[in-house]
Amino acid sequence: MHEPLLPPSLLFGTATAAYQVEGAATEGGRGPSIWDTYCRTPGRVARGESGDVACDHYHRYTEDVALLADLGVDLYRFSVSWPRVQPEGKGKVNPEGLAFYDRLVDALLGAGIEPVLTLYHWDLPQALEDEGGWRVRETACRFGDYTRIVADRLGDRVNRWITLNEPFCSAFVGHAVGRHAPGTREGTPALAAAHHLLLAHGTAVKELRAAGAGEVGITLNPDHLLPATKSEADRAAVERARTLHNRTWFDPLFTGAYPDNEKETWGGLADGSYRREGDLETIGQPLDFLGVNFYRPIMLRDAPHTEPDPALRTAVDIGAEQVSFDGVRHTTMGWPVVPRSFEDLLVDLDRRYPGLPPILITENGSAEPDEPDSAGRVHDRDRVDYLRDHLSALARAIEAGVDVRGYFVWSLLDNFEWAYGYERRFGLVRVDYRTLERHPKDSYHWYRDHLKAHRSRRTQEG
């Protein structure tokens, strides 16, 4: 099978997130996050697991940087743990926490790898959650303070900054579905959380600009949404879902307006009580890039609301029901593998939002069974096929005119997969959770060979 040909200038990397890999949950002055609390609530996480140890990246980061260097990536995307830097989410700064990220950034630069820093990947300090969390405006202000602290410390070495990772998950999976921390099922408060996350983003952009940051962006996880049938009802369900999944974020960020169908989507829950004059101006700060995470498409049909009383509905109870895809492979997450949807999503976003900043694909990958053979090797052919096919789809999107500048595989390491604990593996590198030993999989070697060939073309054409 032919390798996908991509522009020689395209940058490649891998990604991780603090709570999923760092471990050392009670070391070095780190305070508790909402995920520490969530994991200790019975029934929340598979087998009662947590990120207490995770991959122990906090202690083994040099080993992981060596894996990145051997892989040959241009970029490494990681997140900073807010409670490691500010244990209470405000006030006192933890010098040991900042020192860890100093060491990590220096190790990456020493290996010739550019750090791409995400400020927030879901680990809100528990002390702020106790005061209302993302439901209250004050948290956006505190996020600005935290951003300034990190930028002052690392801004001389970090050029690319991402404010938030997938605020959809923080607001709606966390506050309406209840499958992520803080694990609540709310209506208007979840919509308030969405707004305050965007406000936090805009506030952080201002702080980063003031600190002289090189490039600033946000990572969203827009979904490619398909109707189950051509019926008017199913198409309307998709439009409501498009507002929930995509427009809530893209419209304020890139059009300067809130979605015009909020009432059709949420009814009285979208009362706007959490908004103030000037918020859109803060939210819509110009960006240097847009991070896009993509894994799978979603097919929907019209369905009755779960809660008959509109006032009692959660923010995800919008009268739309997911339908399974037939005739395609599914990953161990149960997600359909449809690479063409990756291309279609990127082209659709490019056309719906003229003037989008350049795109970085900040996450793309698959969870697979990954059973090692008798010698401990993992022959993850399905993951190799997934990555190759999605890179081919990316090449077609770029050929169609979408301005994509970088691509990150999720993830470098098998890690703590949130409510699934450690049973779902996304890594290019297998982690033995008993010994914490790292074992590169076949996909690691395939990606390394792909990057070597890509660099060769870059040299020849550069």
Image (spheres, rainbow, N blue to C red):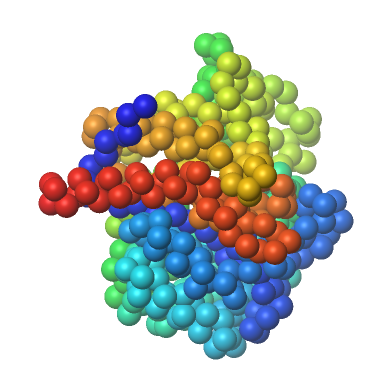
**Rendered-image quadrant of the N terminus:** top left
Q: Position of residue 238 (x, y in %)?
A: 54, 26
Q: Residue at x 59, y 44 (%)?
A: 378
- Left or right: 98, with 456 as reference point: right
| Residue drawn where x is 63% and y is 48% of the image | 375
Answer with left or right where residue 91 lies relative to residue 203.
right
In percent of width and height, residue 179 lies at 72, 47
Vertical side of 202 occupied by 240: above or below: above
**Residue placed furthest toward the front:** 375
**Pick the front one: 143 or 258:** 143
- At a point 70% along the width and 68% down the height, the residue shown is 53
Counting from the top left corner in percent of width and height, residue 43 is at 85, 51
140 to 417, vertically: above or below: below
Q: Nearer the viewer, residue 315 or 80?
A: 80
In this view, the residue farthest toward the right is: 42
Total label count? 0
Residue 241 locus on image (x, y percent):
56, 32
Quadrant of the rendered image containing residue 269: top right
